[in-house]
Amino acid sequence: GQTRAFPRDLQTEMTQSLSIRTRSPEETERMAARLGEKLEAPLIFLLNGGLGAGKTAFSKAFAKGAGSTDDTASPTYTIAATYDSPRGPIHHFDLYRLADPDELYETGFDDYLEDETAFLLVEWPEKAELNGPSCVYVDILADETAPDERTFTFTGEAPVVEAIGRALGIADEVSDGR
């Protein structure tokens, strides 16, 4: 499936990218869980990828890594779900069925964005206009020749992307995103 890359008009000299390739669903789960375990809030993951790319799997593993024991089903029909974790609340949004961005803000989405203690995981983020220093775009690309493999490209402001690199133990591979 085609993904939408980090918007070029938002890239600055502060923008960096980091790409990670996972070779199995288990490897993807370990990577996302490690991020949930190591990263600090506030942080907003904008998850881009086609149907079945792994957005929900990433979100579930992230929540598990953060120590959540809540049921982490995708909120496709409810739009939003919150999971409790020792590292702070995790707000998971699936905007696939959102017809109008105004609907999102009627749910109190602004309050979630302002929560300095929270992680936000947003599937189908192109349905809402989100950006800011704590946003990281995660482009998930499935490999058509190797169905279990995924490439995750994290793009955002340097401090956030560098923290992701440190959490995954690959800080040296962070690059300028332009």
Image (cartoon, rainbow, N blue to C red):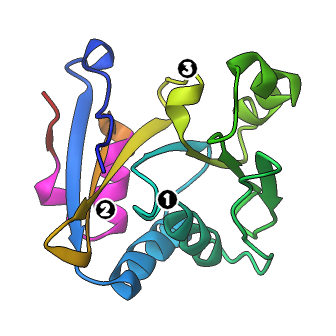
Which amino acid lies under the numbered mark 3 shown in the image of this protein? Glu
* Residue linked to disc 2: 166
Q: Is residue 21 above or below residue 7?
A: below
Residue at position x 77%, y 81% in the image: 69
Q: Nearer the viewer, mark 2 or mark 3?
A: 3
Q: Is residue 111 above or below residue 147?
A: above
* Residue linked to disc 1: 55
**The stretch drawn in magenta includes residue 46:** no
Q: Where residue 177 sits in the image (x, y, percent)?
A: 17, 33
Q: Where residue 168 sits in the image (x, y, percent)?
A: 31, 69
Neighbours of disc 1 within 10 Å: few (<14), some (14-19), many (20+): many
Which amino acid lies under the numbered mark 1 shown in the image of this protein? Lys
Secondary structure at badge 2 equals helix
* Residue linked to disc 3: 129
Secondary structure at badge 3 equals loop
**The stretch drawn in magenta includes residue 173:** yes
Of the image marks 1 and 2, the number of the one nearer the N terminus: 1
